[in-house]
Structure formats: structure tokens, C-alpha cells
Amino acid sequence: MTRNLAIQRAQALIDSGAFAAVLARRVRYATESEEPDAAAGALQAYLDAEMVPSLAVLGFALQLVDNPVDERLPLLIAQRIEAPGLPTVLMYAHGDVVRGHAAQWRSGLSPWELRIEGERWYGRGTADNKGQHSINLAALEQVLAVRGGRLGFNLKLLVEMGEEAGSPGLREVCEQHRETLRADLFLASDGPRLQAGRPTLFLGSRGAFNFELRLTCRERAFHSGNWGGLLANPAIVLANALASLVNARGRIRVEALRPTGIPAAVQRALRDIEVGGGADDPAIDRDWGEPGLRPAERVLGWNSLEVLAMTAGNPAQPVGAIPGSARMFCQLRFVVGTRLADIAPALRSHLDAQGFGAVELHVGAQGEATRLDPDDPWVHWALESMQRTTGQRPALLPNLGGSLPNDIFANVLGLPTLWVPHSYPACGQHAPNEHLLEPVAREALGLMAGLFWDLGDAGTTMRDRRAAAENTTA
């Protein structure tokens, strides 16, 4: 009964074809949560026909949960309780995917069929998130087998089917089932590694605040020769409104939308983090964003304001006319220290003060920023476990550059959150030709087997150590 044996058995699932068979079965479910009606049957079927039997075999008690916000997007709570006094871990997964967009995939590929070409395993969900939670469950199964059917800790799993649609209902379900989901640690997998060849641990995610700037000056367009210089151009007004928010080098100009600084623990964690450099990664613009910061600090330790789309007139067939209206879709990604509740008032106050009172501000999807303290005892434990398995120092990201519903687990459930991602930046997540990289999957199976094994050995000690640390700082 050894840790190495559990790791070897987990990684052998790649060579035997067993892992590919399971993933192929799961990819076939067209679980597109953004589709209003077409995917409803597949979303429910993924839980009923795939998750329920797979988890039952592992000894989980299962509870299907109706979504109180969107009935199309069910959830599943699974519990495996070995003893009341053992430490409890909550895991998370989502079985939904973004739209397949089958026509955009390369010839010979389909979003709903697993196809293996060399090291790339193609199919929608292979990277986000079916491949990732399949790795975790496969590793768990092997640890159970080697340990004789016992983990040495209690395990709970929350599976949602609406993450790609913004996780409607997830917060409400966690609030309603707070006691059922009570745990000592949150451990899950989503998002990409820093680089394909470097195991990564991240502790939260940047928040996201989507907003739209609109200006309607008149009901229709008017001839630019007859009226140019006499009529306000809404596109020009919005361009200047944007320029008051962020300068020509991407530096945010509004103090209320900027962090006050980067905490020392975050700076230490980012010292050896290099962003980009992969074969399919874009070249980083070194003079873009907040001056004086390294690239890792700009994307992981700072806020950024981006324009996602903008329209005025008809870009496909422009005519000599002053448009009557213009729209600009923007997004603020922000770190801990910027309060979500303060962003909209700060934007409105700034626009009014700069003379853009006529510009309408419409708020879209949003989520809070979260970040577990890099010095938390659970962080050191996870890093040591991962390094013991792979022989290399993992990348520690205080938070993901993107956004996840981590604020629900960190703030609503009050859990320390650890994320161990199993995809990589060029995986095609949310794009055509999405794929899982076989070497990453192989290493991830070993990583998770090692983490589960170490939880069984040291989970109680770590729980008590963290509790003592919290009492000392209280």
C-alpha cells in the first residue's frame, strides 16, 4: 500500500486506453449550457447517466438538486463520509461546455467525438471541464483501490451544469445547502496551467465587471457632408469617454478602479512566474498596461480595463453619414482590494465629472475577486505534495488571470480554495479544436493521486494546524 503505486496506477490509465474510453463517452454529451432549449436533455442526462453511476461506484451518496434560478441547469451534490471526525474536502466540477461551433472545427474533427492525434486529444470539454474532472475522479478511484477502499478523509463533490452560462443558481444552492457542503478545504480543477510543462496551483481568481457604454444622439444617421461639424458624433464622444478611463498604453486612469498596491506575499509568489512563451502564445507587448510592473504582476496582481467590442453605423458597409448612436462593450478584470460594489458608482461618478453625463452605463455579468493568502498552511502543503510527485517546483499563482465562481466557495462557504488546473494556455478552450494535452493529463493523474494520498496521511494534521494559525491571528 504505497503512494507511488497509486500514482503509477493512475498514470497507467493513459496507456491502457481506459481513461480515453471514459472521456470519449463524456464528450459525446452535447452539454451546451448557453443554448436555451436544445441542450436541456443532454445537461440532465450527463448527471443522470454519467455522473450518478460513476460516483455511486466510488461510494458516494448522491443528491440531484433542482436549480432555483434556471431549471435547465441541474446540479448534483455527492458525499462520501468515512467518519465524522475526519477532515472534509469539497471538490467542484462543471459538466457543461460552451457552444460546439462544429462548422469552425478543422476537417476531420467534431466537438462531440474524442479524436486522438499524437499528444492532442480533441473534443469539446476535453480541456474545460470534462477532461479535468475526469482526471480527478480517475485518480481518486486508484487511491481508493490501493488504500483498500478508504481515503482517510471525507469527500464531497458539487457538480453544476451552468458554469459556461455564468453559474446561475450556484450561489443560491450553496447558500441553501451550506451545512451539507461544509468542509475544511476546497480542492478543484479548472482553467489552464501557467505553461504546459509546469504544474500550477492557483488560489483564487480575478473578479470581472462587464459593462456597456451607450450613447444615442438621434434616431437615425445624417449625411456627413451636409451635417458634419454640426451634429455630435456619438462614436467620437464614446471614444473620448473611453480615453478618460484608460490611456493609449492601457493604463487605467481612474484611481477608484486601480489597486492600491500588490501585497508582499503576492509579489513573492510571482517572482519566478513568466507569462507566455509557448508555441501558440501571443507575443507580450512590453510597454502595455501599468508601467513599472513585470508581466506576471500586470495580469495576476493588477487590474486591467479592456474593450471587447464596439459598434457605430455599419462597419461592414460604411456610408458617408454621422451615426445616430454608438455602443462600446467593456470589461474590468480586478484583484482583491477592488470592491465589486464600488465599481459601478465609480464609473458613473467619473463619467459625470468628465462631462459625459449623457453616456449611459449598463452593467452586465460580474463576479467578485478572491485570493487565498499564499502563506496559508494548505498552500505550502499542496506545493510540497505536487513537488514530491513531479520533482519540480510548481508555479504558484495567487489568483487566476481569468474568472471563476470562486467567490462562492471562498466567501459564501468560507473555504480555503486550491485549484490544480489540468489544461494549458493553447488548449483551444472556448474555441474550435479544443484539446487535452496527453503529457499534461498523464502528469495530472499522478498529481491528483499524490494529493489525495497525502490528504489521507496528513489531512487531520493540516486541518488542525490551520485552525491553530487562525486562532493565533484572530
Image (spheres, helix red, strand yellow):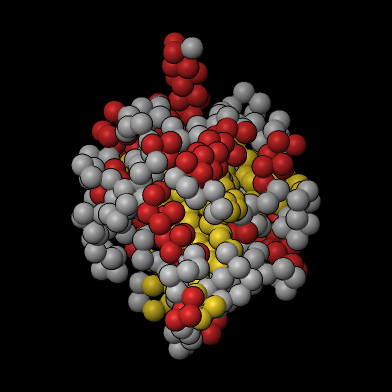
Question: Residue 296 location, x and y as percent?
Answer: 28, 47
- Residue at 54 percent across and 78 percent down: it is 222
Nearer to me, 400 or 112: 400
Nearer to me, 228 or 331: 228
Quadrant of the image occupied by residue 301: top left
Q: How many numbered marks does the figure carry?
A: 0
The reply, left or right, for residue 49 in relation to residue 313 is right
Quadrant of the drawing holding the N terminus: top left
Outermost residue on the bottom side: it is: 107
- Residue at 38 percent across and 37 percent down: it is 255
The reply, left or right, for residue 267 in relation to residue 95 is left
Question: Residue 121 location, x and y as percent?
Answer: 43, 72
Question: Residue 169 location, x and y as percent?
Answer: 71, 48
- Residue at 54 percent across and 54 percent down: it is 359
Asked if one can make out residue 372 in the rendered structure from this viewpoint, the answer is yes
- Residue 263, compared with residue 225, is above or below; it is above
Asked if one can make out residue 444 in the rendered structure from this viewpoint, the answer is no
- Residue 48, compared with residue 203, is above or below; it is below
Quadrant of the image occupied by residue 61: top right
- Residue 456, compared with residue 164, is above or below; it is above
The reply, left or right, for residue 470 in relation to residue 391 is right
Question: Residue 426 location, x and y as percent?
Answer: 36, 66
